[in-house]
Image (cartoon, helix red, strand yellow):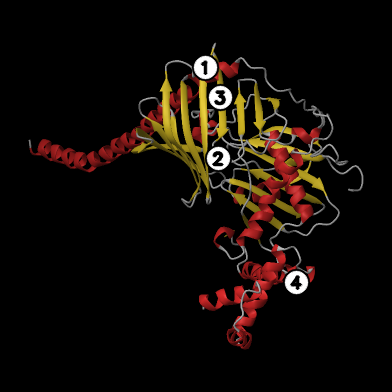
Amino acid sequence: MNKFSRRFFTLLVLFFFIAPVFAVNTLALGNSLDAVSKEKTAIVYLQKMQKAYTEKNYEILYVTSLQSEVEPMQLLHGVIDGEGLTYIRYLNGAIRESLQSSSQISYFEQGNQPYTLATNVDRSVFAKITHFNYKAGLNSYSYVVVGKGRIAGKRALVIHLISKDPYSYSYMIWLDLKSSLPLRLDTITNRNLLIEREEVVSLFVTEDVNPWLMKISQKRLPQLVHINKTKSKSLWKLNWLPPGFKIIKSDQHKLDSNDNKSVSYLMLSNGIVRVSVYISAIKSATGKEKIIQHGSTLIYTLKQGRREVTIIGEIPIQNAQRIVQSISREKPWHKKPV
Amino acid sequence: MNEHNEQLSALIDNELDNTQIMDALVQSVEQQDTFSRYHLIGDIMREEAPNILLDIDFSAFVLAQIEKDNQTLEVPVDFIKMKKNNILSFTKRFGQYAIAASVAGVVVLTSVMMSQPNGSNTHDGLEVLSTIPLGGAASPVSLRTDTQESPVLTKEQKKRTEALLKDHQLQIQIQP
């Protein structure tokens, strides 16, 4: 009896010691589950936004603002016979318009010959965030539903895309709770500085395609401009890629038809931004870096060794600097560098 | 004064007989000035004015003003030398306009180039490159430099940057 009660007591004590450990464990598990499910919720909203952006008929008036410049714009989107058509125009200053279908884009500008380019890359205002694979993007971004807000008179859900490394910008996305269409996009540095904003001021979602858009869809487009395909690959390679980025193009081409020298060219993308890397041979290097920043667009040039590297894209400076340092010759030198 | 001027006007038009008033008018320096001005107006109206008188030189004044402005432009360059490795937003700086304009010239130049059609060769590279105006125009207005060099891009650098920027805009659109 005495022996039994003693054993019971030990068990009881043991239980009290162990119980909190279990409790903490389950709590932690619950938290991480919660974060994952929250991330999943964000992804569902973001995917709904992507679908709405490409499948709905709508008209938006928006402003893009970077530094002290504000540019009011108009966008019409319609789906005609299953194909999306986007019309964009500047509302102030010279008349600048574009019309984009799934396979080409036409540019019209006051005083210039209009032209058409074959492309399947969406050039519209929220294209960055509406063609991104959010599930795969979890490796380099985390998604947080921040809360609710009101944009353009609509109730909006705010989602924060936080870059997991300092080599990409973070974004804040506002989307309409009713139509799921994007209403605002803020580009934010890792120091939480706002550097660029695209914001809708008026949104109309319609059942039918805008009649005017319907009409211009039947018009003949300007002449298609042919761009010569290049065969050769870049003479230089990158030994480091920013997280989430892949090389999507590598070639040598001339910047200008009058140029006699080609530059080596590499294009990097993480699904949100596209970055160009230009490498050319120069006679004298100064080791000087030149940085031009306009909103989120960076133009970074470094003359080093016997080469000049220029990186253009919507990336932080750290990214460009590290890319430049990682550049090396694709093959060993065959002859003395020119 | 107006009354005097009226008398002066009458004098010019040979309608004044009173010599006393005439003497008074001639003795007043101010009135003499007015007299010459009225005469000039009359001469111009009758198209008799000698050219020399009309040679009013603004250029000296404008040049002086420009020189004054140029002096103020030197200030930010020194400022930059002091603040190495810092991104400067020139929009808030003295003389920002000249720098912003020269860097933004990347875009300005682009449109200038575009508006000069090179014959009818629309298949040629040059025209193809003119994709900036719509594709998220880049007209850089802030610039960082960590060297002793002036941040203002030279003409050659501007041309180069412009060419690269145009090519970037084109490359991100065409098929990989």
Q: What crowding class fits label 1: few (fewer than 14 Cα within 10 Å), some (14-19), or many (20 or more)?
A: many
- Dot 2 and dot 3 within a common chain: yes
Query: Quick one: SS at disc 4?
Result: helix
* Chain ID, mark 3: A
Mark 2 or 3: the one toward you = 2
> For the residues marked 3 and 4, what is the alpha-carbon distance in whole angstroms?
64 Å
Q: Chain of mark 4?
A: B
Cβ atoms under marks 4 and 2 closer than 8 Å: no
In the rendered structure, the residue with mark 1 lies on which chain?
A
Q: Quarter of the image for the N terminus of chain A: give it.
A: top left
Tag shown at residue A79 = 1
Residue positioned 42% across, 23% down in the render: A205
Q: Quadrant of residue B8?
A: bottom right
Q: Residue at x 35, y 34 (%)?
A: A153
Asked if marks 4 and 1 fall on the same chain, the answer is: no
* Residue of label 4: B53
- Mark 1: which secondary structure? strand
- Cα distance in 3D space between marks 2 and 1: 27 Å
- In this rendering, which labeled residue sits more in front, label 3 or label 4? 4
Residue on which the image places disc 3: A86
Few, some or many residues within 10 Å of mark 2 (<14, 14–19, 20+): few
Residue A118 shows which numbered tag?
A: none
| Residue type highlighted by circle 1 | Val
Label pair 4/1, CB-CB below 8 angstroms: no
Q: Amino acid at mark 3?
A: Thr
> Between B81 and A101, which is closer to the camera in this rendering?
A101
**Is A42 on the left-hand or right-hand side of B131?**
left
The residue indicated by pointer 2 is A92
Badge 3 element:
strand
Distance, label 4 to label 1, CA atoms, is: 72 Å
Give the spatial CA distance, label 4 vs label 2.
Answer: 46 Å
N-terminal-most mark, 2 or 1: 1
